[in-house]
Amino acid sequence: MKRLLSIAFLASTAIGFAGQAQSQTVFLSTQLRPIEEATAVREELLSGLERPVDYVVEEPPQFAVRMEAERQAGRHTISLVGALHGELSPLADKQMLEPLDDLAKKLVSAGMPQSLLDLGKLGKAEQQYIPWMQATYVMAANKDALQYLPEGADINKLDYDQLIAWGKKMEEATGAPQIGFPAGPKGLMARYFQGYFYPSFTGGVVRTFKNPDAVAGWEKLRELWTVVAPTSTNYDFMQEPLASGEVMVAWDHVARLKNAISASPDQYVVFPAPAGPKGRGYMPVVAGLAIPKGAPDKANATAIIEHLATPQVQLKTASLVGFFPTLNVQLPPDLDPGVALLAGAVTATQSAPDAMISLLPVGLGDKGGEFNKVYMDAFQRIILQNEPIDAVLKAQGETLTKLMADTKAPCWAPDAKSDGACQVE
Amino acid sequence: MTQNRSWIPYLLILPTVVFLGLLFVVPLIQTLWLAVSDNGVPSLANMQTMVRDINFGRSILNTFLLTLAVVPIQIAMALAMGSMVSKVNGGRETILWIWTIPLGISDLAAGMVWLSILQNTGYLNTLLFSMGLIERQTAWLTYQTPVALFVGIAIAEIWRGTAIVMIIIVAGLNQVPKEFKEAAEIFGASPWTRFTRITLPLIRPALQSALILRTVLAFEVFAVVYALGGRNFPVLVGEAYNWQNQNQNYSVAAAYAVLIMVISLAATLFYLKVIKVDPERLP
Amino acid sequence: MSTARNAGFISARRLLLWSGIVALCAWVLVPIYLVALGALGGRSGVYQWPKTILPTNVSLQPFILFLKTEGVFQSFLNSLGAAGITVTLSILLGAPAGYALARYDFRGKDSFRLLVLLTRAFPLAILALPLTVSFIRLGLYDTVVGVGLIHTVLALPFAALVTQGIFLGVPRELEEAAWVFGCTRIQAFFKIVAPLALPGLVATAVFAFVISWNEVFAASVLTVRHRTLTAYLLTVLSESPMHYRFAGGLLLILPSVVFIFAVRRYLFAIWGISSK
């Protein structure tokens, strides 16, 4: 028995450590996490490199914990990180990122727009990260839904009243609500409030949290929600309910719509999110690549960044995972037609005359989750539990004020700039 | 036993005590401290945050409702399974094996299993559709159908958690001497009387451990609920998980952990008091 | 006449009994069958409406594709590793404690029993939060050994209590007889007690295995790269298409079906002995 046990122990320890010994360059990313996307990165985007890369994904909260733990312990395993602009900025604040100015110079001459590269400075003198890929959120509709579009509505210039009218007609015709939002536990619904709902209705995100415009907006959302599929609170990715026909119209991140649209591009139209009284809010997403200070394998990390920033790999990234290039390259016409549809909607959003840009939250550090919770709790209480709007916004506004005071984060667009912490007005 | 060797039992339990001390008691105290402190000074701030959170009341209610719905059904099913299998001679082992399979199924996997049945394009809807009871896909797991959602989660929990109760109860039933039953039969007691007067009292220890184990586990239910209900059905451990993982606030998560511990301990003490058993018989 | 009616009555009861048994078997097996259909049906199968209950359009392809996904196999190995450590440690530490509880009266026995019971009343997985900090310091964070250690905390109380029952079931007289015949205590233990207790120990080991194999919460908190299968699935599956989720569910179920089959005989013995 004892011998058996010791053999079992040794064997299991050996199994546990098998495959951990190789010296690979560790690439930790908060982007492209879903299994199929991660596989595409490993097998397609990172192939052809000389040294093997261990592509590891991590959800944003754990990413922050992990980076902080490595900094505190002084033991570094990660050579390269890929994360959103807002997730990299706390790292830059703590001086945790290597300056990448040489690389940035090279990429300017390769055709990366200077304006985009400047984002990667995160307000500092040196280049903190290299823009890797960009994306945003759009709406997609099954072509069967177009027959119910209210008269006179231009799908590329929808406003909220038209969306509601459209939803009502679809519900009358089919017997079930046909509009879907990713309000499940892993869905990106919080981004809808921060990048679309609040900017469109109030022209701000934090400052305007509980002003009269916000109250009017929530009332409008209540009206919209009567024609939204109640299973929305179970949806994490809208591509699945779209493809299965559970909903006909959906709002989501382009990468989370891509599978449905690429699978049958003839079946869908993709268009900008609706406009509110203050404009057509939208949230661009920029993911960047950065090298942490103390990275064990800087040379190879630099090589990986250069590889991922070549035109071929950038286009491949677009067609495989639905994130768009940061290089100034034309998407070729023979690109995946689904990705072309999504790209068209992104262009339509950015060039809309009433477009209002809303940046990802910056400077919240590890409070990003609680920041999202403020908006999602307001949503749950106002829309799902039908509580009075004024009272809920007042209570959630207090939480938000405290949160912003704790983090001392200054306002970001579309809120007007602030001295010191951004506060609810 | 022999007095001069009184150090032996201490030597034997020493590894366990050290191990549990390092990996259970120390982090337990850390958790307690985390829950009742703020930046290193004693404070009730975390408790307040927890109690004021919109999901706090609902998660307590949901956890208790689920426990109250699931545990009695599981005990009843396990008793039924136990008495059924005792009447069977051939194939007994196979039947028991099949009934025990869910024991090895994690709550995560159980969640996926029932998701495949209860989702919109799932098998339940297919069945109802083919019987003409519904005209189109019906959603069962939404905030608008709280009863259906609750029933779905309860069914998944019953499916997954009955096996452990059954094992304990079948083992208990095996211990009931045949002579008692035969004697009762001779005196003309009805099957129901035999069950309530003879079997039930004799399997008290098994019943008690089954109840304690299952109730504590029911308070820790998480992955099944998460898979089926998403954010529509908050439960205590799920809230702890959210505060820890999504909101990155370990202190509030610790407050939830302490609350769960208090509830579980109270339930355990309740069972120990209500169903009195010689402590030696505790498994 | 009366015997005939009696026979009819009995066979009606048998029919009832067997239909109950069959229904309960179906209650366990049908959901597993359905998730297997989902796992083997691929992407198109998930969207199909209405579904077919028969295994048409089924192939092993989607499941094999899932198994080939980066990380699945490694995390499968990690799960085996963590479970192996859990089994080994919980028996090596728990069996002596169980023996002490079964054979000796000593001061502090009740306190010890209380400590062990206390672990049952606490959602142990939540201890992973404070442990994260200590584990980072000790270099155990994100290792299979670290996960094995916390899983041992889960399985150890169970092992101690169950082995206590097992040793109680081995007659003390046999052991004492061995001492009379000149065996040392240790010899007596390994020659007499251990063989008799072996089946129960095996079952304890399998329980420890299942506890570790299925644990999600602690494993996902304590690991980043070296995830166990459940932790890996919890992070990737929630963001993956349905057929991947079902394939993951099936992969979690299959080993436990085999384990339970392997020890089905001991399962009842272990509880039977321990609740004596």
Image (cartoon, coloured by chain):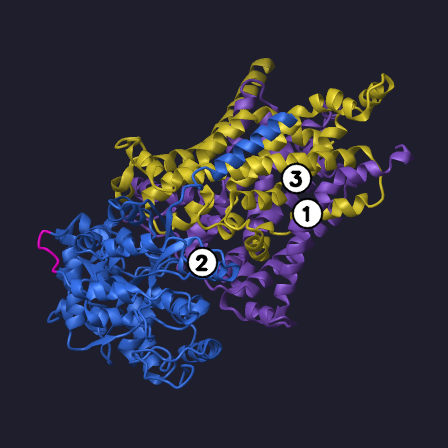
Chain colours: A blue, B purple, C yellow
Q: Where is residue A128 in the image (x, y as percent from the top left)?
A: 33, 67
Looking at the image, how many numbered discs can be counted on the residues?
A: 3
Residue C158: numbered disc: 3
Q: Establish if A191 lies above or below A206.
A: above
Q: Quadrant of residue A220?
A: bottom left
Q: What stretch is highlighted in magenta?
A: A330-334
Which chain letter goes with mark 1? B
Which chain letter goes with mark 3? C
Give the camera-side residue of C15 and B43. B43
The reply to whether dot 3 and dot 1 touch (C-beta < 8 Å) is no
Q: Residue type at mark 1? A: Leu
Count neighbours of disc 2 (C-alpha within 10 A) and say few if under 14, some if 14 to 19, many if 20 or more.
some
Q: Provide the secondary structure element on which disc 3 rests.
A: helix
Q: Position of residue B130 (x, y in %)?
A: 29, 40
A38 sits left or right of A110 in the view: right
Q: Residue type at mark 2? A: Gln
Q: Which quarter shows the N terminus of chain A?
A: top right
Give the camera-side residue of B133 and A21. A21
**Magenta-colored segment: predominant secondary structure:** loop
Give the number of the mark in front: 3 or 2: 2
B17 sits left or right of B69 in the view: right
Residue that label 1 marks = B20
Residue A62: numbered disc: 2
